[in-house]
Image: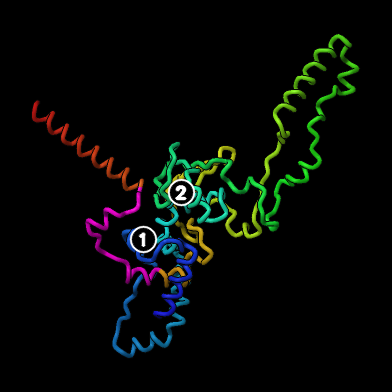
Amino acid sequence: MFQQRWKSKAVMRAYHGDFIKEKVFKRWFLPETLPDVRPKRKVLGDDKASLEEFALRKKKEEDLAEEEAQKGMAPVGSLMFTEVERRIDVFLFRTCFVHSVYEARRLIIHGDVMLNGKKHQNANTRLAPGDMVSVKPEAIRFFKKPSDPNWYDVNNYEQMVEHFDPTEDDEISEADAENLTPVEQAPKYAELREAKQARNSEGPPKYPFTPFYLPHFASPWLFIPAYIEPNFATCSAIYVRHPTARPGYSEIPTPYDADGEVVRFAWEWYVERRPRMRTTAQLARMPEDRALAQRESIEEGRKGLRKDVLRNSRRI
């Protein structure tokens, strides 16, 4: 059982925040209370009944699975990675603006990411519902010609550039030439001439289409979770709410069954080994949590409001 739990924990952590140290993950990125994914059942009776239950444990597991399927229990075990999904670097990866979490961390540290309209360079920040994250378009690697030939040209950009003719609109069409008199054609030719001169002075031609390249390994993560609202025209996305779970479905992106044995064994590992105490020095090193900061500001506002109400009531 120990080996199964350890291996399950290892494979889950390899996908969910492998760049986070295990000690830091257990201290800051596990929820305060982990949901119970394996409700305990008492075995009533003497030793004989216990032995019978042990011998028929396979049937008991099948009955438990059938009972869970009938009740429609939500796969809450995967929600222990909610805090990891709230990180701004993981959020940026989920929006499909970058091809890896490491690329997202690079953009954040280099100042190419804005949080609510302000430059943000802390990749450990946990977002609050309503936060908007924006990326500079010139920093997104999908819009640049890659050095790796295995990347896929989605828009056939190179082929379109090769056949693009910027002088197509430099002449009046035959239909316009027939409908316009020579006097009316003169200003039209003058406009086309001025447009051609302006285009030549600007340097290389500007193409009316956008390059877009994807790596060959993009298909497994090319999706948008339900708690994210992206806008690809402005290269921005909004963290709408925290991930949730409902019967038969979990919003936490994971390659494993959200209610399978791997997630359950990993949950059992962290239930027994997560740190319980946080000293004042440890709290000072806590990564930025915008949702917690909002709750604290709301509580401070409520306390101030109560003081004002009490002060006014005493005056009356």
Please state if 204 lies on the left or on the right of 16 as rendered. right
Please name the residue that numbered disc 2 is placed on.
109
Verify whether residue 284 appears in magenta: yes
Q: Nearer the viewer, residue 284 or 205?
A: 205
Who is closer to the viewer here, 174 or 65? 174
Image quadrant for the N terminus?
Answer: bottom left
Instruction: Identify which amino acid the numbered label 2 is placed on.
Output: Ile
Q: Residues within 10 Å of mark 2 (few under 14, many from 20)?
A: few
Looking at this view, is 295 or 279 the one in front? 279
The residue positioned 75% from the left and 28% from the top of the image is 200
Instruction: Please tell me how many numbered marks the rendered image carries.
Output: 2
Residue at the image point whose x is 77% and y is 24% from the top: 196
Name the kind of residue labelled 1 in the image: Leu
On the image, the x and y values in percent for residue 123 come to 43, 51
What residue do we see at 68% from left, 55% from top?
151
Q: Secondary structure at mark 1?
A: loop
Q: Which residues are magenta?
A: 267-289
Which color mode does the image show? rainbow
Q: Position of residue 304 (x, y in %)?
A: 20, 36
Relative vertical location of residue 56 with respect to residue 6 in this rendering, above or below: below
**Badge 1 or badge 2: first in the primary sequence:** 1
Say above or below: 195 vs 163. above
Indicate the quadrant containing the C terminus: top left, top right, bottom left or bottom right: top left
Residue 21, image x and y in percent? 39, 64
